[in-house]
Image (cartoon, rainbow, N blue to C red):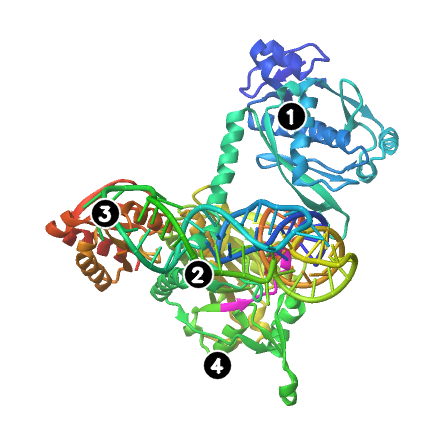
Amino acid sequence: MKITLPDNSSRELPEGSSGYDLAKDIGPGLAKSAVAVSVDGVQRDLHDVIEGDASVSIITIDSDQGIEIMRHTLTAQVLARAIKNLYPKSKLAIGPTIDDGFYYDVESEKSISSDDLSKIEDEMKKIIKTKSSITKKLVSKSEALKVFKENKESYKEIIVNESKQKDNFQLYYQDDKKFVDLCRGPHLPNLEFIGSFKLTKVSGAYWKGDSANAMLTRIYGTAFNNEKDLQSHLDNLEEALKRDHRKLGKEMDLFHFQDEAPGMVFWHQNGWSIYRKLRNFIRGRLKENDYIEVNTPQVIDRKLWEASGHWDKYRENMFITEIDEEHANEKRVNALKPMNCPGHVQIYNQGIKSYKDLPLRYAEFGLCHRYEPSGTMHGLMRVRAFTQDDGHIFCTEDQIESETGLFIKFLSDIYADLGFKNFDIKLSTRPEMRVGSDETWDKAEEALEAAIKNLGYPYRIDEGDGAFYGPKLDFVLTDAIGREWQCGTFQLDFNLAERLDATYVGEDGQKHTPVMIHRAVLGSFERFIGILIENYAGKLPFWLAPQQVVVASIISDVNDYSLEIMDLLNKEGIRAEVDLRNEKISYKVREHSSKKVPVIFAIGNKEKIDRTVSVRRIGSTDTKVLDLEKALNDLKQENRELN
RNA sequence: GCUCAUAUAGCUCAGCGGUAGAGCACUUGCUUGGUAAGUAAGAGGUCACCGGUUCAAGUCCGGUUAUGAGCUCCA
């Protein structure tokens, strides 16, 4: 039979040859590192017979696919077996691979905690030491059911039962045949290929991801081909931990949370300073881009939310207020706004709008409350009260494309200035829970896709993830350590304006319904500040830092000079303080460095006599002696860049 | 909302039935020191909240609240 290789060369092999035979035919080195094959694009076990002519590529252990297969074998054959050895009554559910690792879901008679992980790891190592080869057996549905019934693996039974397949269920065994697992494969040919691994955590997970189902125990692990790669991955995790905005927020005295107001931020002076700087920056950009800033009420009668559709579609996430006994005579039910859009329509509806007024771009730093489920809150990243850099563009259908283009430019400039050079665009289409007719949705989805296509931006489609009132573009940025954050959004809405009776008079003198575009760049200030903190590991750019300069005296004789410098800095609008305490300079440097103050001026006798400053920047141990004049000018320039 | 875990001094944590501990931070004394911790002393706690078991409860048990890791959600 004729086998075509990835480089388009081909080889003749006898009928009945396997991937392993092919690898051997190509070279002994390849045969040694081969773990599986891809036959016409489908991954197969290395020893599967290749049925007739095919394009085949050998998957080696050091390839991405190879590592994934290794992780898969590690979880399905080694972790699963170790769990069965240690907890014989447990039942196996599923064990897939994930980014950088794998997990296995089990139902366990005894709860497994993170303390048990090292015990399980030891058991896994014992299994790996057997260097057992892995073989598979193809069986019919009834035989597969029989095997799992005997083994009391009820989840496997469910999987087999629900499968559309009739036969060729793949059962994988190790040499001693004492453990069997159902798996679509492929697996490593033997356990010698298993690299370095670590079990990382244990948590609960629903069977099939459905919260109506039983909660299983999920054991997570990470694995790489060698100790070095594993270690570097673990180091990355540790780096992310070091950047945790909750930890840095405490160290830098930015904000706190407390029991009485879960999910709502108490901003301290330093954190609020960042917030204000960021808001001023955005405010400036909005003005430059012809947005009108407005402000709408926090608490609004349910009637408006009923009209907008929120009451129907979003009520369980809204904070509802009821008037107490004292005001019983004006009984009404209000809701704290979860979004600003209905409010903006109210402003739009004041007075008659002409097509000449469009596009009309409203912006609001709108404080919204959403009742997030208790288990979902996470520092600044997921809160119940937050301020959006929200905006609503009222325009005609003809203006959709130009507004899309203007917005993407607006957003990418802001991201770049805040230190994020790359972002991806996601196009989300109609969700199940929605308002508006299918025809309207067809129109909205087509318009948005046409706009993004004509503008030439790359995008990917996320089916069913749209807002309840319309399709949207989401903007996902990548931070300094490669994590992705969905921030900006651009949502087309052909429904709300109509529901709330917004109209404009067209050229034809008739009333028309405007298109509404809901848009945000940062998303929420709270979350975005969290992202900034983690992106910069607390070392914010000079213009954003709450405290920009500390002038630290080395000896008390120079305190007057330090105070003079602080005054000069403050006069230039730079947030500077002095540190005149009776402490050593290294103590002061340590303290202000750990608080991430970008610039420390160390002032001693030499500096006072020469009217210079010794400058130390955060993240560097170098110091530079500059003329006071020059140092002031440099910082003034730097501060002006984005202010 | 679900599962599991956690809640002790401002912070980080130890203590796990018998009168509350450490390091850092804080206050005071000494120290005026050149770029990531000078030194000594002192002060500081209804051990999250409510209930139970016990002669005796941070300590054991139940509940509540919050937080953490996941899951499910995130218009």
Q: Which residue position holds label 2?
A: A403
Label at residue A615: 3
Instruction: State which region is magenta.
Output: A367-376
Marks 3 and 4 share the same chain? yes
Q: Are marks 3 and 2 in contact (CB under 8 Å)?
A: no
Q: Residues within 10 Å of mark 1 (few under 14, many from 20)?
A: few
Q: Amino acid at mark 1?
A: Asp
Marks 1 and 2 share the same chain? yes
Q: What separation in Å lies between label 1 and label 2 (alpha carbons)? A: 45 Å
Q: Which residue position holds label 1?
A: A40
Q: What separation in Å lies between label 3 and label 4 (alpha carbons)? A: 56 Å
Q: Earlier in the sequence, mark 4 or mark 1?
A: 1
Q: Residues within 10 Å of mark 4 (few under 14, many from 20)?
A: few
Q: Earlier in the sequence, mark 1 or mark 2?
A: 1
Q: Amino acid at mark 4?
A: Gln
- For label 1, the SS is loop
